[in-house]
Image (cartoon, grey):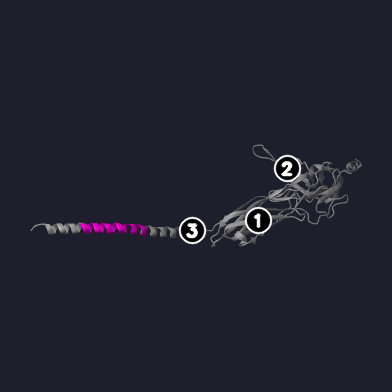
Amino acid sequence: MHRVAAATAALTAAALTVLALPAPAAAGESAWSVQPSSRTGPGNRPFLTYDLTPGGTVTDYVAVTNLGTKEMTFTVYGSDAFTTSTGGYDLLPATHESTDVGSWVRLGATTVTVPARSRADIPFVLTIPANATPGDHAGGIVAAITTASADATGNTTRVEQRVGTRLYLRVTGDLKPGLRVDGLRAAYRPAWTMFTGDLELSYTVRNTGNTRITPGQAVTTEGLFGLAAASADPEPLPELLPGAAVERTVRVTGRPALLRLFASVELDSPDGATARSSVGVWAWSWYHLALLLLIAAAVLAVRRRRGRARDGARARPRARARARARARENAATTSAADETPA
């Protein structure tokens, strides 16, 4: 309780500092930055980073710098972070309620007006709930301006422009890094080059643990009995927050059409988390089809030839029988003619 009271007392008004910026913004241009700071101003910290126990508290500062040539009023708030579908790091907008570390931030000022080319150092207190789950919690502190405009029908659109700094918190306890490959699918695309094609793999990489992870990945392909084994060079994976997932598509070109190909995706991380998934796919070439057509044509020709031979073999006895019958008829006719009286 004493720590919380001391931290609350530290939430005084933001301190304003007039800056001598070497590169002024253009007249009327709105530009600003947000970065970790201190009572005396920013240092060299890239992010707000903390290791705390459940129930712990820390007091810190964030700097909002107006880089433009006009006074600006900002709304400042804490926000939870999430991993975007493309692997980016983003923060919830003000219209979405934060339920994790963003909601644990209490700012000394939630609205601050900063003169042109000046900086406001805003104190805040980060208080960890006693029941906070162990592991990594990611968020940020945002300085935003919101503008409203109306269209011809009178509908109002509000646009929030935001700049923020990241906040990384690790709550001490049982850390359980984890990775998983979901939904691995493979498709083989035949090429016009003889007996080759492209192998396309689609899959989802998911962080199933409670720590931030930047996974390494390896993609390998091979035919039956390990023939034509090769590895791909996929795009590096981004940092994944706990529970986050990103979809990836890897195209492996020039793979031989060995009728059956196998592909594997393997993940690893410095903290020991691993995952693996495999899939098989039929790998046909257009030349396989042409070869099958040639074989089918040859088989059909042989069958026809054999059919004609069988028909001929069956027809010869019948022809001989007809010839004998005609010979007998001719003989009978000749005999009857010889017996006729003159």
Work out how far the residue at label 2 is from the one at label 1, CA to CA, in angstroms: 49 Å
Return the residue found at the far top.
154
The residue singled out by tag 1 in the image is: 264
Check the image and report above or below for 327 versus 85. below
Q: Label 3 amino acid?
A: Leu
| In this view, the mark in front (2 or 1) | 1
Work out how far the residue at label 2 is from the one at label 3, CA to CA, in angstroms: 67 Å
In front of the other: 317 or 286: 317
Work out how far the residue at label 1 is from the one at label 3, CA to CA, in angstroms: 30 Å
Q: Label 1 amino acid?
A: Ser
Q: Which residues are magenta?
A: 309-328
Q: Dot 3 lies on which element?
A: helix
The residue singled out by tag 3 in the image is: 292
Can you see residue 74? Answer: no
- Position of 262 with respect to 55 (left or right) is left
Q: Position of residue 253 (x, y in %)?
A: 60, 60
In front of the other: 2 or 303: 303
**Residues at badges 1 and 3 in contact (C-beta under 8 Å)?**
no
Q: How many marks do you count on the picture?
A: 3
Q: Dot 1 lies on which element?
A: strand
Label 1 packing within 10 angstroms: few (<14), some (14-19), many (20+): some
Q: Quadrant of the C terminus?
A: bottom left
Q: Label 2 amino acid?
A: Thr
Overall secondary structure of the magenta section: helix
**What residue is rendered at 25% in x and 58% in y?**
324
The residue singled out by tag 2 in the image is: 147
Label 3 packing within 10 angstroms: few (<14), some (14-19), many (20+): few
Residue 330 found in image quarter: bottom left
Residue 198 found in image quarter: bottom right
